[in-house]
Image (cartoon, helix red, strand yellow):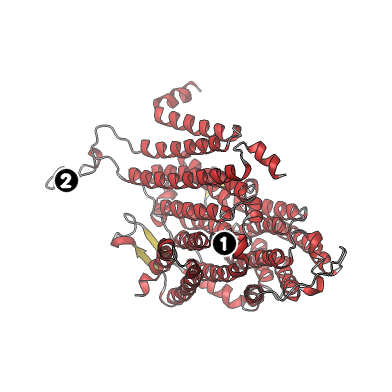
């Protein structure tokens, strides 16, 4: 048990990921305001992106551009570029989703005059 | 030329979607003919592609010439090609159906609507072809974003349903991405074939179990599997009448196809992770979905709500077939998927016609239309036969193969679940048919006019397709058996 707790603190990036993810989830579930729900949703997305970047981090490595064309390639001295590329795409996807979400919020506000979930549900009934 | 067909199939709707807002800025009425042309071209190209794949084997398409483990790869195999023919035909029918419903129902946003429809179809094409887990995520999200916008395009009650779907769908996508990054961390690859080669050596890894769990939950939300189905009925019921047939017939089924790809193409089907056989899990989840979805459908009064819950139960039946782990069950599941897509499209076309032309939303009102609606009643009877699964229709042969597969695997619980869900389906269709034929409600002396040609066409073609899929079931099943089976099966 103590070992497990100790192991968690060995990897602060995973701990940070879990905290941001759960925080976003908590905000999304407990708040009634639709914009706050969107903020929670974006926190969850960001936490996954953070996780993806952090698993590719490497100590003492440099950008993946070949330093010399004559020496054999040392994989250990370059950071893996793929997760960063994936992250860029995931950020674009997240921004697009958020844009649609905000547009829906604006349309809901124009129709019901409120962003509070309970008030909207009362008006729908 | 023939090896470029997958890319052509994807780029046709994508370019049309991108250029639509510019081209149709001044000429809004051009948007429908353009989309019809593009989708008709997609039907032709997808049939060509199927013909090519059946005769010359699968087509591997490497983007920019970067081959498999390094680059992004698309594979047009038998399964993808069959699904694409279905997808483009249903898309064409959906656009044909849009004509008479659109002017008031879409709130004047015609160009937006067609742009989103084309974007949606290009994304679905991407999901079907993609053999790269991250590529799959991107297309799932493009399809999801265009469907959020499509549901909300007309405003009104649908806005809130679309917002709920957006929140849940995005959580699903994030969890899926998390699972993919776990698997990437374990295997160091995203290509499905490459990952399939590496996974057997990593079965003890906890990260693998976590990654698979997250992927299953994420895709489960996307395909409205039973514990995660909350977004689906509202979104489909309140979406504009021309949108819900397209979404209901394709969105959840294509997400299910992505799941099938991961189970059979990435994982070996017979895999056991920490003492849990994955396929048994799939079959159990399917059985739960089949029974719970059908019982919830029985409780609905609103037509579209009822059909949406019916869709949830049919997702379960497909999963039961997929989860048997033998060829009969797998082919039965895929064949049932084809049938179910057609039947869901037909059901929501029917609900759309009932509302747009006859003003009927619930079972209580449907008795009013009675004998004045021969097309509506006729196609309802055919669809009911298909949904319940009586012999001349495709639904029967799908369920038949699924049950045969379950018996072959000695899985009697699955058989019981299919039979129980069939009985429940029968029960809610009896309710519907009773409403129409027994005329329990007060009849109004309203004379309804002839329904428009495009309504007749969509109802007629889908009803005929349900029958034809049944009549030609053995060549189709044979085609699937020869060309659509996963590797090492």
Q: Position of residue B4 (x, y in %)?
A: 36, 70
Residue tagged 1: B250
Q: Position of residue B476 (x, y in %)?
A: 57, 75
Residue tagged 2: A72
Q: Residue B156 versus residue B170: which sits nearer the camera?
A: B156
**B254 w.r.t. A96: above or below:** below
Q: Secondary structure at mark 2?
A: loop
Mark 2 neighbour class, 10 Å CA radius: few under 14, some 14 to 19, many 20 or more: few
On the question of residue B254 being in view, the answer is: yes
Q: Is the N terminus of chain B in the top left, top right, bottom left or bottom right quadrant?
A: bottom left
**B88 w.r.t. A9: above or below:** below
Residue at image coords 28%, 32%: A59
Relative placement, left or right, of B174 versus B151 is left
Q: Position of residue A96 (x, y in %)?
A: 45, 47
Residue at image coords 37%, 49%: B189
Q: How many marks?
A: 2
């Amino acid at each position: 048990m103590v070992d497990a707790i100790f192991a968690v603190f060995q990897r602060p990036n995973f701990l940070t990921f879990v905290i941001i993810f759960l925080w976003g989830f908590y905000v999304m579930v407990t708040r009634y305001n639709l914009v706050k729900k969107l903020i929670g949703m974006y926190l969850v997305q960001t936490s996954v992106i953070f996780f993806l970047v952090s698993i590719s981090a490497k100590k003492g490595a440099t950008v993946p551009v070949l330093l010399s064309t004559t020496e054999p390639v040392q994989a250990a001295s370059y950071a893996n570029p793929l997760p960063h590329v994936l992250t860029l795409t995931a950020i674009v996807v997240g921004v697009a989703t958020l844009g649609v979400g905000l547009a829906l919020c604006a349309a809901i506000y124009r129709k019901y005059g409120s962003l509070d979930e309970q008030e909207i549900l009362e008006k729908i009934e | 030329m023939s090896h470029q067909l997958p890319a052509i199939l994807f780029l046709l709707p994508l370019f049309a979607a991108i250029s639509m807002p510019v081209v149709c800025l001044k000429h809004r009425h051009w948007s429908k003919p353009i989309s019809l042309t593009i989708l008709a071209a997609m039907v032709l190209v997808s049939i060509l592609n199927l013909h090519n794949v059946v005769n010359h084997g699968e087509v591997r398409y490497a983007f920019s010439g970067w081959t498999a483990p390094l680059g992004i790869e698309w594979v047009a195999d038998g399964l993808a090609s069959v699904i694409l023919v279905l997808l483009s035909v249903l898309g064409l029918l959906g656009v044909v159906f849009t004509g008479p419903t659109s002017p008031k129902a879409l709130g004047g946003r015609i160009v937006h609507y067609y742009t989103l429809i084309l974007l949606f179809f290009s994304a679905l094409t991407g999901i079907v072809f993609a053999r790269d887990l991250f590529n799959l995520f991107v297309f799932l999200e493009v399809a999801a974003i265009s469907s959020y916008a499509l549901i909300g395009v007309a405003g009104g009650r649908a806005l809130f349903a679309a917002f709920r779907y957006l929140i849940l769908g995005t959580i699903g996508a994030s969890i899926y991405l998390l699972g993919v990054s776990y698997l990437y961390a374990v295997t160091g690859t995203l290509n499905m074939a490459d990952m399939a080669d590496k996974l057997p050596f990593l079965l003890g890894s906890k990260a693998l179990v976590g990654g698979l769990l997250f992927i299953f939950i994420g895709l489960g939300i996307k395909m409205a599997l039973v514990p995660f189905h909350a977004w689906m009925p509202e979104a489909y019921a309140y979406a504009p009448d021309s949108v819900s047939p397209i979404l209901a017939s394709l969105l959840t089924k294509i997400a299910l196809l992505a799941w099938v790809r991961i189970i059979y193409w990435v994982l070996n089907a017979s895999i056991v992770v920490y003492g849990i056989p994955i396929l048994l899990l799939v079959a159990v989840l399917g059985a739960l979905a089949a029974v719970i979805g059908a019982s919830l459908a029985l409780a609905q009064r609103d037509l579209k709500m009822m059909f949406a819950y019916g869709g949830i139960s049919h997702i379960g039946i497909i999963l039961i077939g997929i989860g048997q782990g033998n060829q009969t069950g797998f082919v039965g599941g895929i064949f049932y998927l084809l049938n179910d897509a057609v039947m869901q499209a037909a059901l929501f076309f029917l609900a759309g016609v009932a509302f747009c032309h006859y003003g009927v939303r619930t079972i209580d009102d449907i008795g009013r239309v009675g004998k004045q609606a021969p097309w509506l009643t006729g196609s309802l009877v055919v669809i009911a036969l298909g949904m319940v699964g009586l012999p001349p229709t495709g639904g029967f042969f799908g369920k038949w193969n699924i049950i045969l597969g379950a018996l072959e695997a000695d899985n009697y619980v699955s058989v019981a679940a299919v039979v129980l869900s069939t009985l429940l389906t029968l029960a809610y269709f009896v309710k519907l048919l009773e409403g129409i034929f027994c005329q329990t409600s007060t009849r109004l002396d309203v004379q309804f006019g002839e329904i428009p040609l495009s309504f007749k066409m969509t109802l007629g073609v889908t009803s005929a397709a349900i029958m034809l899929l049944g009549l030609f079931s053995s060549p189709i099943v044979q085609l699937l058996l020869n060309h659509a089976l996963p590797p090492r099966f």
